Image (cartoon, rainbow, N blue to C red):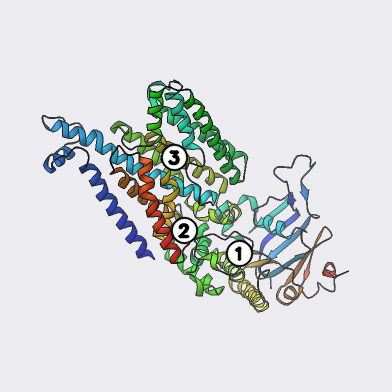
Amino acid sequence: MAYGVLLKCENLCVGYGAVRPKRGAERPLSLFEPFSFELHAGEVVALMGVNGCGKSTLLKTFAGLVPQVSGDVFLDGEPLQAWNARERARRVGLVRMSGTAPDRMTVREFVGLGRSPYSGFLDGRTAEDERIVDDAMQATDVACFAERPFTELSDGERSRVFLAEAVAQQVNVLLLDEPNAFLDIPRSHALFRLLKKFVGMREMGIIVSTHSIEYAEKYCDRIAVIDGGCFRVAPASEARTLGLLDWARDE
Amino acid sequence: MKNRIWFCFGFLFLVAVSLSFCTLATGPVWVSWPDFFSALFAGPSAEVGADSITSQIIWRLRVPRMCAAVLAGTSLSVAGLALQTVFCNPLAGPFVLGISSGASLGVALSLLAGFSFGNFGVLGAAAVGASAVTIIVMWVSGRFRNVGVLLIVGLLLGYLIDAIVSVLIAGSEAEALRVYVTWSMGSFGRMLLDGVWVFALAVAAGLGLVVVSMRYLNAARLGDDFARGLGVRVEVSKKCVLLGASILAAACTAFCGPVAFVGIAVPHLAFMLFKTTDHRVLVPGAALCGTVLCLLAGLFPVSIPLNAVLSIVGVPVVFYVLVRGSRTGWW
């Protein structure tokens, strides 16, 4: 199943305050124990854990938006910080559902922003860019409302538009932060099927944080869990027997 | 969509050119057409015989006036557009950063309190005041990551400066006060031919700083984290845009006085005309809209204050466009 290693981390410690420690805090706040992990091309990894355990922070660290407290992250074999901002944006993309809704922007314009890391000095777009934007909108089923203003969309439609933008960005490593939070059940199934299709077709690796064990077990190749200050990962079929899902029990 | 954009550009450009021509051809003194063209093509230095008066009128009064209107329209609109985008706030404009208040303070100190700014007079005083506020604003923008703080600091600075100016006004002579109030009403008529180059250079520098941050401007509405995810160097770009907008606003305030209306209204006008959020279209589009509006206002008699004309001409236009826009579902 695995082709190559897209994203790799060694003894990674994730948290806040790595650059500017807050006054009073002796050292940077780290959210859980150091861990090592590899994301391969062609796999979908579910990231699970209780609220506030550090799922979003971990995804932000992988996307280069939050500096790690200690340890190393490698993207395509190079340290994450060694990539310049634009090169990095062509390889890793983080999709969040809680972004601000830009007023006056149409869906097409928003998805077109995904081509920004490839554009030149004046942010121009080529015919090739337009084609990729069209493809991304087709693939995520948003082409039918391409000309509608973003602010008029429902939450579910917005989720797909956020995803379309990342697809247009043509990243190898796609990080999704609770993409099915606003989606109905059929759409959630469709989303995870789409993710499976992407990793097969486009040689991507996907990490998706979700609270739904059902989708994680059904559609993802591996399940990673942050529980009790530890990061653990196991194949999706064995996660339950290995006790990775114990945190989800109601006690 | 593309056709619409090109049509708007063409239309605005034609209107701007014909308004520029009207600015040159009309005025309190009537100049016959042959005299007008011969003086225009003879250049600014030709002062031969009976033509010299005509030449003086055209080159000393009307050409600087036209240039002032074009440059003021461009600089204020682009500064307003850039600030509205960076602050994600439709009410932002060159005035909220306190830049024109700074210029007012410089001028008030020079005219009312008798501080001398060397040989540069009112112009120099305005430039010094505007630059001082710009430096404070840039320093604050480096210390705080949240742009909202910057907005508050700009407003607070504006209030503080207004208070100082009103203290100065209370203790000043009637004649000095009259000069200050005339300055504060704004005018394109104070421009001198020699000053046009300075103004044009400042506008070019400001525009350059805004244009190199094009990728940031297009992503800025989605927030800093989103822009970072697109590979935009947010901190550098934001400083570039703020500095560029400050230079544009400072230059315009120094040469034309505190012209309030254009910076806040024209970006909305440009949005409604071009119906896009792509700043590659909006920056030149807003510059053209601002130019047209300022040229139009410049055609009114000099005796009416520029700020009053701009608001009287501009508010109905912008209001009409907004109401029409809301009917077509674009607001």
Type of amino acid at the residue the image marks with label 2: Thr
Q: Amino acid at mark 1?
A: Asn
Identify the residue at horizontal 32%, vertical 35% (top origin): B196
Image coords of residue A147 (percent x, y): 47, 69
Nearer to the camera, A176 or B33: B33
Q: Tell me if I can see residue B107 in this picture.
A: yes
Per the image, the residue denoted by label 1 is A172
Residue B171 drawn at (x, y percent): 48, 22
Label 1's element? loop
User: Is residue B241 shown above or below A223?
Assistant: above
Chain identifier of the residue bearing label 3 in the image = B
Determine crowd level at label 2: few under 14, some 14-19, many 20+ residues with C-alpha closer than 10 A. many
Quarter of the image holding residue B155? top right
Q: Nearer the viewer, mark 1 or mark 3?
A: 3
Local crowd at mark 3 within 10 Å, few (<14), some, or many (≥20)?
Answer: many
Question: Considering depth in this image, is B31 or B143 the residue closer to the camera?
Answer: B31
Q: Position of residue B285 (x, y in %)?
A: 38, 53
Corner quadrant of residue A197: bottom right
Q: Are the numbered discs 1 and 3 placed on the same chain, yes or no?
A: no
**Quadrant of the image for the N terminus of chain A?**
bottom right
Q: Chain of mark 1?
A: A
Q: Which mark is residue B277?
A: 2
Left/right of residue B243 with respect to residue A209 in the rendered view: left
Front in this rendered view, residue B231 or A238: B231
Q: Is residue A6 above or below residue B92?
A: below
Placement of the C terminus of chain A among the 4 image quadrants: bottom right
